[in-house]
Image: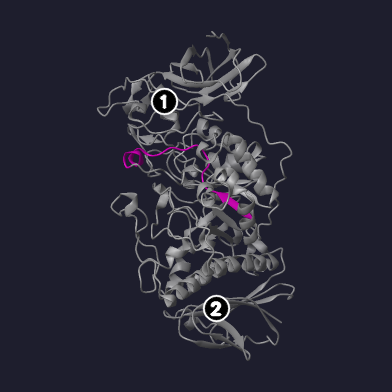
Amino acid sequence: MSTYTVNNGQPFPLGSSVTENGVNFAVVSEDAHALILCLFDEEDNELQRLPFIAKQRGIWHMEVLGLKENQRYGLRAEGPFEPEKQWLFNKNKLLIDPYARALTEKLVWHADQAAMTEEGELHLVDSAYCVPKSIVKTVLPAENRPKRVNVLPSHRALYELHVKGFSQQLPIDDALKGTYLGVISKEGLAHLTSLGVTTIQLMPCFSFANERHLEELNLKNYWGYNPISFFAAEPSYAQQDATVEFQKMVDGLREAGFEVILDVVYNHTAESDMDQSSVCYRGLDNAHYYRSADGHYLNFTGCGNCVDTYHSASIRLICDSMRYWVEVMGVDGFRFDLGVDMGRTDHDFSPKAPLLQAILQDPTLSHTCLVMEPWDIGPGGYQVGQFPRGFLECNDQYRDTIRRFWRGDEGIIPLFATRIMGSRDYFHKGQRSALHSVNCITYHDGYTLNDLVSYHRRHNLANMENNRDGHGDNISQNFGIEGETDNTEIQSKRLNQQLCFIATLLLSQGTPHFLGGDELSHSQKGNNNAYCQDNETTWLSWQENDARKALQTALSSLMTIRKAYPILAEIYLEDDPLYQHMDADHIEWLNQFSQPMSEGEWSESERDYLALTLTSADISNRLWIVFYREDHPLNVPLPKNSENIEVLFQTPGMSIKNDTLQCDYRGVLLAKLA
């Protein structure tokens, strides 16, 4: 067995890095009295413990001479154990390096990982046997990487994709199912390119763990919003090397013409509550990595802890992680889970928070696509429209209003008009483009599009929480029967409603977000919180059927139209100071007689018809968009000066005959007027 010697080494870069003479280690732990490096062999036998010999600016560092690539290691921190002061140092607990590029295995919760007992005393059991080891790994950008796809903001359309869910049931080789490489299989890429979307939004791919209660229920965290590492790629999606295969997936998507953004969780970690796992940040510097007050965690995430993104070590960790995923792993941007935590200072949100400003001034990160989920569950946690320029924002106001309109809610017309025109009450004129509003009808945390029109209430019993979890009010409708049915009339109504949703989304001002699987008419059987369902509930089904054909055709057709007519995504209006340097486009709102809407008509509580014309500044394009949500027939005269009309898109119940729009039942129409 080798005995290694050490020297002071360097405080940067953080983590482990191969040098000419060995490996340099640098780890942040401001309050620890001592930090120890533990070396392991391939059978996880501990070989040697080496105390760090130098510390500056809160960073412990040293170079271990003779060490090589792929060495397995862990950390142990010694210091005070005073939970009331947020000090949880326990040398019996092996810790993961926060900057580790790879781990030996997936983290699985175990009671022996805790720093304290249930009675609040020091937990004396050594946890090395149940904690993954960090691996010394030099990760370089892939050679001959395809260049980033330059997506026009007005063309951008996000497609939310879960690596396993997308590829697990694809008709591909079994070895590729559920993997990074399965996403870029011939079949996978053929489907994605057929849709016309521009941007693949990958659900979390950081190495993540199951929550304690899921382990006890024999369930799995499927979504991945429970990270333990901000650098290591999730190993369960790989055949062999998660790092290399993730890079290949991103490069394959780029070659196919896609922008790739990664859903990231920087707001909390898998260590959860104070009395649970101490496997990384908690054991190294609990008082600085996590927000607390009066001796207790501030749980603004609902996950047991929240990262203190106001502390310099966390800001550096998150920005270093982001640069790594851009520069080395190849992604083109990020979607931030519970992004308000990233904008909190001591406790309150500020658009001038240090982390947000650090990202926006960074020469690498500021050029990426940045999408915020603009809320958390802490005080002042709802901040839609309040993030600084440079961040797009998920707009739940859009989602709820569009659902209410198509459900038939009263008094919704003025709000519906506001939402389809870019939610300027939140994304204010003169300050931000309407494209900052990321519009969606469905997201992973809720109903699929199929379930939105098939279920009146949630059906989450499989989650084993007595159906208490998930949204209680889904603004859905089932058209008379709860769940699946053989009734062809109801099936037809449900499909038409889905087509209306897709059309509304892609004819609205802003940036559209599409939930992967909605184009396949995927159903989760009414489960609107399927985070722990790693099975056919969440795995996409690829069976051919009429509904899938209709939905895919509508999506791809509307994406083609949207790219051909940028005014559908962003209109330059005369009263918008943001566009004063542009020639003004024109909008006119029309009633069912194709006459301008009167003030009284705007306030009609049961109004079911709304139309508008969009005319480009150069008058080269004049588009007529119609929304009708009633199932009784309605005949509408064509707008004036429309002798020649070209229908670009229509749902099944809409048609133009004899200079009249015939609405047989609810639907959407887009036409180009001469």
Residue 142 picture quarter: top right
Q: Is residue 151 above or below residue 55?
A: below
**Disc count in the image?**
2
Q: Tell us which disc is closer to us: 2 or 1.
A: 2
The amino acid marked with disc number 1 is: Gly
Q: Which residues are magenta?
A: 198-217
Image coordinates for residue 118, horizontal then vertical, percent: 26, 29
Image coordinates for residue 566, horizontal then vertical, percent: 68, 66
Q: Earlier in the sequence, mark 2 or mark 1?
A: 1
Query: What colouring does the structure picture have?
Result: one colour
Residue at point 31%, 22% (across, down): 123
Farthest-out residue, bottom:
658
Task: Look at the image and say whether residue 273 sits in the magenta stretch.
Answer: no
In the foreground, 486 or 252:
486
**Residue 520 appears in the figure:** yes
Image coordinates for residue 499, horizontal then vertical, percent: 53, 70
Residue tagged 1: 283
Farthest-out residue, front:
173
- On the rendered structure, is 383 left or right of 624? left
Q: Which mark is residue 652?
A: 2
